[in-house]
Amino acid sequence: MHRRQFIQTIGISGALAVAGKISAQTAPAPGTVTPSAAPDALVKGTPAVFAPTPDSFTVTVPLAADALVWLEYGETEKLGSTAKGDSFGFVQHDDTVVKIKVRNLKPGTRYYWRVVTKPAFPYIGSQKPVLREPVPETRSQIYTTKTLAPNARKTQFSVWNDTHDHNETIRALHTARRADDDFMIWNGDMSNNVNDRALLPGLYVCPQGVDLAEGPPILGTRGNHDVRGLWAGRMSDYVEYPNGNRPFYAFRSGPIAAIALDTGEDKPDNHRSYRGGAAFEPIIREQAAWLEEVIRRPEMRDAPYRVVFCHIPLRWTDESPQDYEGKGFDRYSLRGRLAWQGALVKWGAQIIISGHTHRHALLQPTKEFPYTQITGGGPQPKRATVIRGHADAGKLKVSVIRMHDGVSLNDLEFEPLTKVA
C-alpha cells in the first residue's frame, strides 16, 4: 500500500468508527430529520445561545468527537435556512466545541433553529469515491430564540450571578426562567476555577440537568473566579460576546441601554497568587477609553434607562483597605471605579447590577455616586437570587428575588431620563 493510501485509510477508518456508532443509534438517511430522543455520539451536551444582537445570535455546541456542525434556522419551525460556513469557507468542525454565528437577521424577531452534526471525514481532494455508505446526519430538537429589539417599546431581562458550578442552584434558576425575557445576563463566577479542561462544557454551556437553549439568549460577564485556573483562557471558546472575543460590550434592548464591563480579578495583577499570569489592569484602562466612545453613540446617549452590569461591584458597604499580603481581597473594584466613574456619571448610569459578594445588598445613590448599586446573592440555593428587570415608557422596575422561597428582597423603580450625555 502506498503511503498516501495508508494515511487516507487510517483517517477514514477512525471516522467510520464514529459513524458506525451513530448509525447504530440513529440510522438516519441523509437529510432525514432525526429527533433528539436518540443520543448523538458526536456531541457532549446540549447547546446554548449567546451574544444576541439585533441581527445575529451565536450557538455553542460542545463536542465529544470530530464532527461537522451547522445550524438550520428560520422564522417558523419549517426552518429553511442554514448557517454553515466559517470565514475561510469551511463547514465548522472540531472535536471539542464549535461556535456558529447566525447573521443577517431581523431585529426583535423570533427564530427557530436546530443543530445538525455528522462525522468529520478527512478531505481527500480526489474524485475517486472512498465511502460506499451514506454518512448519517443527526439533528437536535428544534429550539427557539430571538434577536434584540433596540426600538421596542418595552423589554425585560433576568440576571444570574455567582453560580460557581452549583448545579442545584443553576437548576433552580433555570426552572424559574421567564420565557418572554429578551435576554439573560450571567453576571460572572460561573466557575470556581478551571484547572480541568473537561469541566469547560458543563461550566458554560451544558450544566448537568439543564438545557440552557430552552431559555432566553445569554449575555455573559466574567467574574474573578472565571479567570482562574490553567484552562480559564478557554472560556471564550465557549462563551461568545457581542463585541467578538472582548469581554465587555454595550447594547440596546427597547428603552434600556446597557453596558457590560469586565472587572477582572479581586486583587492587583502583581499579587503573588497569580504567579505572574494576571494582566487585567490594562483591560480596565482599555475599557475606560472605550466607554468615552460608547456613551456618545446615539442609541446609548438617548436611551430612557441606563444600566450597567459588572461582576465586582463599584461600591460597597465597607470600603476599608485590604491586606493583600494576608488574605485580603476586593469586595468592590476600586480600580474599575477610578477608571470608569467619570464616564458612567457623565452618561447618567442609573443602576449598577453586580454579584461577587455572595449576598444581596442595596446602596442608594449619593452626591458622589449618583447611581444605585445592587448585588445578587449566591451560590448556595438559600443565598441565591435572581434579579428581574422590566422597562417601558413609564418606568424601569428592578426586583431582587430570593430563589428558595420567592421572597422579593428589594423592588426598585427608575424614572426615564431626558439628559443627554
Image (cartoon, rainbow, N blue to C red):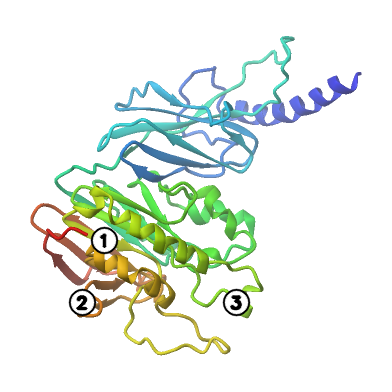
Along the line of sight, which residue is nearer the eye, 400 or 207?
400
Q: Measuring 72% from the left and 17% from the top, which residue is drawn there?
A: 125
Distance from label 3 to label 2 (Cα)?
33 Å
Report which residue position mark 3 lands on.
270
Q: Which of marks 1 and 3 is nearer the N terminus?
A: 3
Question: Relative to residue 247, is residue 130 depicted above or below?
Answer: above
Q: What residue type is labelled 1?
A: Val
Counting from the top left corner in percent of width and height, residue 156 is at: 22, 52
- Whether residue 147 appears in this view of the structure is yes
Counting from the top left corner in percent of width and height, residue 143 is at: 37, 36
Counting from the top left corner in percent of width and height, residue 86 is at: 54, 31
Q: Which amino acid does label 3 sit on?
A: Asn
Which image quarter holds the N terminus? top right
Q: Measuring 23% from the left and 72% from the top, which residue is drawn there?
A: 371
Report which residue position mark 2 lands on.
365
Query: Given contact means CB atoms under 8 Å apart, are the residues at marks 1 and 3 in contact?
Result: no
Q: Earlier in the sequence, mark 2 or mark 1?
A: 1
Q: Which of marks 3 and 2 is nearer the N terminus?
A: 3
Q: Residue 307 carries which label?
A: 1
Q: Measuring 58% from the left and 60% from the top, which residue is drawn there?
A: 232
Give the secondary structure at mark 3. loop
Q: Which amino acid does label 2 sit on?
A: Pro
